[in-house]
């Protein structure tokens, strides 16, 4: 995991194996950002330092969790890097509706 800014989400398999291939899928459970260091954010989650992720670990087996990320190092439009990352997090939260995200937010351009 890189030591750069970015957006990420944590996904998992179903918490119960139903022995049915067509129900084998992963779902986003938590969406987040790191304005400076994705690796440090990952380590913070592994230590259980954030409430939302602690809720995930109570339901899902930790070994079934996957940390997906995208590095965001440069602005792609007129927004500064911090605003861009925040907006990406908000859009992912809106799209996936992850249950462990407690905070509801709006994108900067609304």
Image (spheres, helix red, strand yellow):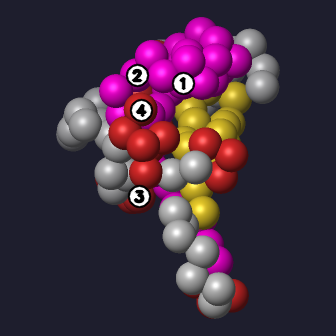
Which is in the foreground here, disc 3 or disc 4?
4
CA–CA distance in space, label 1 to label 2? 6 Å
Residue annotated with mark 3: 96
Give the label, 1 or 3, closer to the camera: 1
The label nearer to you, 4 versus 1, is 4
Residue closer to the observer: 42 or 73: 42
* Quarter in which the C terminus is drawn: top left
Q: Is residue 23 above or below residue 47?
A: below
Residue drawn where x is 59% and y is 10% of the image: 36
Q: Which mark is residue 54?
A: 4
Q: Residue 34: x, y in percent?
A: 54, 19
Q: Nearer the viewer, mark 2 or mark 3?
A: 2
The first of marks 1 and 3 along the sequence is 1
**Residue denoted by label 2:** 50
Residue 35 visible: yes
Q: Which residues are magenta?
A: 24-53
First-in-chain label (3 vs 4): 4
Determine contact: label 4, label 2, CB under 8 Å: yes
Asked if residue 90 is positioned above or below residue 42 in the image, the reply reads below
Cβ–Cβ below 8 Å for labels 1 and 2? yes
Q: Return the residue nearer the eye: 2 or 17.
A: 17
């Amino acid at each position: 995991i890189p030591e750069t800014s970015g957006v990420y989400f944590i996904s998992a398999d179903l918490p119960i194996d139903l022995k049915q291939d067509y129900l084998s899928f992963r779902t986003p459970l938590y969406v987040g950002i790191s304005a400076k260091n994705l690796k440090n954010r990952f380590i913070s989650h592994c230590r259980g330092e954030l409430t939302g992720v602690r809720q995930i670990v109570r339901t899902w087996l930790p070994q079934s969790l996957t940390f997906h990320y995208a590095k965001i190092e440069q602005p792609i439009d007129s927004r500064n890097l911090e605003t861009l990352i925040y907006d990406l997090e908000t859009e992912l939260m809106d799209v996936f509706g992850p249950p462990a995200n407690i905070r509801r937010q709006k994108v900067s351009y609304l």
